[in-house]
Image (cartoon, rainbow, N blue to C red):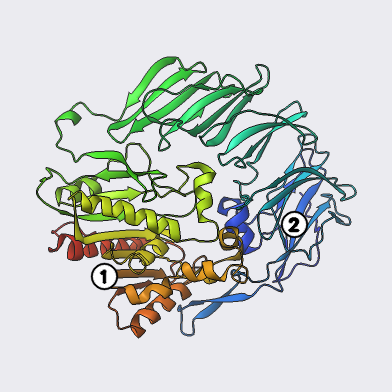
Amino acid sequence: GKEVQLTKDGSNVILNGYASWVYWEEIFGRPTRFRAFWWSPDSKQIAYMRFDESMVPMFPIYSSEGQHGFIEETRYPKAGDKNPEVKLGFVQPDGGATVWADFNDKEDQYFGWPIWRPDGSTLLVQWINRGQDHLKIFDVAPASGSKKLMYEEKQNSWVDLEDGAGGRITFLSNGKDFILSSDKTGWNHLYLHNADGSLKNAITNGAFTVLDVKYIDEKSRQVYFTARCKENSARIDYYSAKLNGTEIKRLSFGEFDHNVNVSPTAKYFITTYSNVATPTAMSLLDNKGKQIRQLGSAKGADMDSYNMAKTEVIRIKSEDGLFELPAVVTWPMNMDPNKKYPMLISIYGGPNAGTVWDRWNWNMNRQWYAKEGLIQVAFDHRASGQFGKQGVAYMHRNLGKWEMKDYMTMAKWFIEKGYADASKICITGFSYGGYMSSLALTMGADVFTHGMAGGSVIRWELYDSHYTEKFMDTPQENPEGYKQGNVLNYVDKYKGMLQIVHGTMDDNVHMQNSIQLISALQDKGKDFEFMLYPNGRHGWGGAKGVHFNNLKTKFIYKHLLTKPVPQGILR
């Protein structure tokens, strides 16, 4: 086909239809692969964003390859920095002038993933202020660029702009209605709106979190969706509800976590289900929840004869008594009630990013460590998503505070019960989990004795604008919050052993973070372990990935199990 050039001003700082780094990483999402253009349904228009990065600070990322190495330049806005200026335009595929949407590109703002109306008449554009607490959705006309406010939402904490590349709104095929998801009540729910944006009614409500719309049956006026289980937030269930907000029904069954695959008309669904004590199985059901056929199970005939370590989900009351915090625990094999065991805590810890699920997670590595006498746990704090947006909002303007309070409470529970050896409490994580592990060995040093921290944020001034400021506001607006969340301000308390790991070309969490922590520890005469992975990004595979896994295994044996690594364990 014929190639037509639609824009002519592109450069190393002017990006047309190609997302600026902070949009790709934090708003549109990595799966979009930097795409920032959207064809209309009839293919007669292309909407695109133009990013001017000229005012965004350049962060140098060094590669040691070759004789002289090289610098990779990334336009990376850190907290409080100038963001790229963004314009939204419309152009016809065969060329011509761009029609620019009626937004002021000089304003401090963000744009979310836009979506065309099914008939292609207008583009719905999500706009939010830099403070990220005031969302507006505009109907934008491609012929003139004029805009009309269709929906508005304010929250005291923040409104999420990143929503899985357009997942906030789902249009009905009649073109007259759409379903919008929002956590404005403190829990994420579904709302039915008229085409002009006016609210018809709430479809779901209550103290549970709706996750994904799976299918809309317009003939029966019914929507099918997944949600965190009303009775157990560590499980996912499948539900149906009438569009008028009545007849919410659970369609999945039992005390299981469900991963559903819905048929093209939602008349049937296949669920892959399990819990921590029940191996994964699959069943076919109809849309009334009636089981049609058991399709299979991962449980073998001899499994009941195996001597396996016990895994269970438990709840631990928070220090202030407001939350029953979930943990998934694999206990040591043949556990002696008179013995105290080393404990390994695996976490991530970011806002609305919990890791505790009541689902089958058996693996050889976990069974081996249980045989070696290690308590293995994952913790979720109050802001992990287990308690809706009302729980997540605790993190507003104070990242690090409540996560560490809750993690310390949960770790102390195991110590006070006599299960865990207080001298061997190890926490490990990567990225936000690395931040938590570093904070645990400093702020939480009275509880946590060992840590393995990979790709860690150390102080929030060093991370990107959109993510950081959503929770913290800018450093200028919230200096006390940034101070309290800064690992470096607790280095004096450090007294255990922390393994620090970073990829040298990490373009997400810059190695600068770990370097600043290392410098502070050195200045205080503190001992630690450190490993670089040359040319590693925010994670790495191949031979270096194997080396990293071996590094962690050696740390566990040296500091927690206090014996040599058995032959054949290292890869």
Give the distance between the C-alpha atoms of the residues marked 2 and 1, in whole angstroms: 49 Å
Seen from the viewer's position, the closer of residues 423 and 26 is: 423
**Residue drawn where x is 53% and y is 45% of the image:** 390
Q: Nearer the viewer, residue 337 or 237?
A: 337
Quadrant including the C terminus = bottom left
- Residue 185, horizontal then vertical, whole percent: 60, 40
Residue that extends furthest to the front in the rendered view of this protein: 320
- Type of amino acid under label 1: Gly
Q: Quadrant of residue 446?
A: bottom left
The reply to whether residue 263 is in sight is no
**Residue drawn 59% across and 29% down?**
204
Q: How far from the left and from the top, in percent, is residue 29?
A: 58, 53
Residue 165 seen? yes
Q: How many marks?
A: 2
Q: Eyeballing the image, is 136 above or below 180?
A: below
Counting from the top left corner in percent of width and height, residue 296 is at: 34, 24
Indicate left or right for 387 with 77 as reference: left
User: Going 11% across and 42% down the picture, which residue do you hit?
Assistant: 334
The disc label shown at residue 240, or none: none
Residue underneath mark 2: 49
Counting from the top left corner in percent of width and height, residue 254 is at 37, 23
Q: Which one is in front in this view, the residue at disc 2 or the one at disc 1?
A: 1
Three-letter amino acid code at disc 2? Met
Which label's residue is closer to the chain start, 2 or 1? 2
Viewer-nearest residue: 156 or 138: 156
Residue ID for mark 1: 496
